């Protein structure tokens, strides 16, 4: 059953008085329930930054190229492209 607009407004007005961390916790709980389709409260996991989540995703186990190697590759590409 969906809440009517006045009910939703009353809920939002009541929540506005809550501390910010409680508002965020409620929002997370609502989103978790919507995503899982479950009415049970999921255990909150620590947030990970995008960097932590993506670090090493394209790694093939080799050392990264040096600045000199990258500069050489760029020069080679420019030579092929512009022919000078």
Image (tube, rainbow, N blue to C red):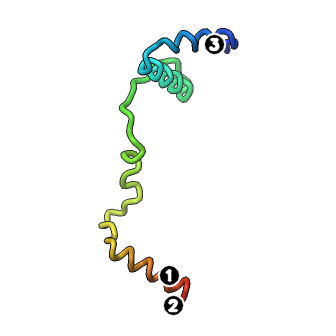
Disc 1 designates what residue? 78
> Looking at this view, is 60 or 68 the one in front?
68
Residue 53: name its quadrant.
top left
Q: Which residue is identified by label 2?
A: 84
Determine the CA span between mark 1 and mark 3: 60 Å
Q: What crowding class fits label 2: few (fewer than 14 Cα within 10 Å), some (14-19), or many (20 or more)?
A: few
Q: Earlier in the sequence, mark 3 or mark 2?
A: 3
Quadrant the N terminus occupies: top right
State the residue position of label 3: 9
Residue depicted at x 33% and y 71%: 67
Which residue is pictured at 39% across the width and 26% down the height?
Answer: 44
Numbered disc 2: secondary structure: loop
Residue 74: give x, y in percent of width and height: 44, 77
Contact (CB < 8 A) between labels 2 and 1?
Answer: yes
Q: Name the spot of residue 26 as percent of width and height, x first.
A: 48, 19
SS category of the residue bearing label 1: helix
Residue sitting at the far bottom: 84
Side of 55 relative to 9 (left or right): left
Give coordinates of residue 21: x percent, y percent: 41, 21
Q: Nearer the viewer, residue 59 or 28?
A: 28
CA gap between label 2 and label 1 equals 8 Å
């Amino acid at each position: 059953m969906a809440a009517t607009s006045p009910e939703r407004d009353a809920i939002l007005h009541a929540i506005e008085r809550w501390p910010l961390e409680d508002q965020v916790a409620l929002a997370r709980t609502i989103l978790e329930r919507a995503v899982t389709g479950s009415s049970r409260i999921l255990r909150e996991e620590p947030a990970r930054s995008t960097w932590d989540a993506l670090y090493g995703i394209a790694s093939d186990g080799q050392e990264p190229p040096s600045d000199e190697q990258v500069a050489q590759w760029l020069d080679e590409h420019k030579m092929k492209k512009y022919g000078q």
